[in-house]
Amino acid sequence: MSWVSAQQLVDGKLSGASTGASYDVVNPATGEVIGQAPDSAAADLEAAIAAARRAFDESGWATDVELRVRCLRQLHQALLDHADEFRALTTAEVGMPGFMMGAAGFDVPVEGLRWVTDLLASYEWETDLGVASPMGIASRRTVRREPIGVVAAITPWNVPTQINLAKIGPALAAGCTVVLKPAPDTPWVACELGRFVAEHTDMPAGVFNVVTPRSNEVAAVLASDPRVDMVSFTGSTATGRAIMAAAAPTLKKVFLELGGKSAAIALDDADVGAVAGATAFAACIHAGQGCAITTRLVVPRERYDEAVSVAAATMESIGAKDPSDPGAICGPVISQVQRDRVEGYLRLAIEEGGRFATGGHVIDQAGFWVEPTVVAGLDNTSRLAQEEIFGPVLVVIAHDGDDDAVRIANDSAYGLSGSVDSGDLERAKDVARRIRTGTLAVNGGVWFSPDAPFGGYKQSGLGREMGVAGFEEYLETKTMAEPA
């Protein structure tokens, strides 16, 4: 399948980089070059920020709800109309297995765009607090919500369409203008969003911009420029800290969705084999490249060997397959850099005293492949249990009862997601309430949905994405009072 060449969108115009520079887009399943992306220069980011600032300050975008609803519905329809091509491009550029397109790869984020547009159409922008007499002066008070301004949306490579739309949908719906900067490993799907806006919507020039610099130094201006009112970032905790520091001098708002090392807990009355199988399956999805994936399996000590055996058998049955294969669950990792990083953790597993129940090696073939791996014999103090690997690697840890399981789950710098399973639903919920994470699956429940807020505790981030809370991240609150 052929796709339209990737172009940046700046001030309503699709183009290459101002310098003419570009870089390769690589299929991670094969290592082959499948296209080129503009290597946006500092001048391109300057133009994009200026356009977004001008569009917010001078156009009617921030105040015209009807226009915003119409444009977002047009973008939603364009995504539906070009769904097949978009899904195929995602598999080729991201290495994402096709089965994920029915979930985070495409369908759920596109549904999320429709959901937030419906929210926009019915949202109450003002709340009447009624009359009070502070300091003896009778006053009617109104709380008003207004768009925060220019938003820099900086997104990662793992599930780019989900994260791109989870940022730009609410930001645009709120009345903000946006500069989207995707990861240089996956610029093309972001450029397609820019093309759809330019060719299929009535969005005014400058409201939505897409720039694709390869250089972090060029992109860094988005966090420091005083014309940018908010940075919305998803990615590593280390980069999140750097963005927060860069934003501090201008005191701009920062939204951060960062790393995770989520625990799947099986209590002693759970079906441990079923939990182990489901967790091993989850750790294989998209080669484990998901911040909310449960990568620590925490099981009763007396059932440890059973859990390891089931997890290993599950991973062996899944294997690593070409993402275009209809049966693929675990595809490649995104790049040589990422493959080398995961391989370093596999070496570390042995150095720390662990053993491989299955896997444990990179796969010597074209592209960037890692065997689905179960690591046994480590406790929660090991680096493999504490650090985000972002590969198909599951660490199995023993617990000695409910309190110990909670201690292990919370003994982490992260707090993004997790799960609890028990034969007693109320017992599972009691344990879940004690775990300091932003999302939890209890006895197999699914939290991932456009209307459900997503985000983390501790070093997993600040703020929430999706749901009403995610929409309101892009709003300011203004209180007005008038004589009663």
Image: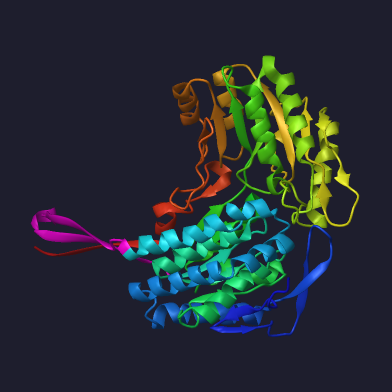
Relative horizontal placement of residue 131, taking residue 48 as reference (left or right):
left
Within the image, what quadrant is residue 148 found in?
A: bottom left
Give coordinates of residue 138: x percent, y percent: 9, 58
Relative horizontal placement of residue 118, taking residue 226 as reference (left or right):
left
Tell me how the rendering is colored. rainbow
Relative horizontal placement of residue 354, taking residue 238 as reference (left or right):
right
Residue 145 sits inside the magenta stretch: yes
- What residue is shown at x 79% (from left), y 36% (from top)? 316
Closer-to-camera residue (257/419): 419
Within the image, what quadrant is residue 33 found in?
A: bottom right
Give coordinates of residue 237: x percent, y percent: 63, 50
Q: Is residue 336 visible?
A: yes
From this viewpoint, which residue is outermost toward the front? 326
From this viewpoint, which residue is outermost toward the right? 364
Closer-to-camera residue (103/268): 103
Image quadrant holding the C terminus, namely: bottom left
Q: Is residue 251 visible?
A: no
Give coordinates of residue 95: x percent, y percent: 73, 57
Within the image, what quadrant is residue 139 found in?
A: bottom left
From this viewpoint, which residue is outermost toward the top? 302
Q: Which residues are magenta?
A: 122-149
- What residue is shown at x 48% (from left), y 64% (from top)? 169
Residue 41 sits inside the magenta stretch: no
Give coordinates of residue 23: x percent, y percent: 77, 73
- What residue is shown at x 57% (from left), y 62% (from top)? 164
Image quadrant holding the N terminus, namely: bottom right
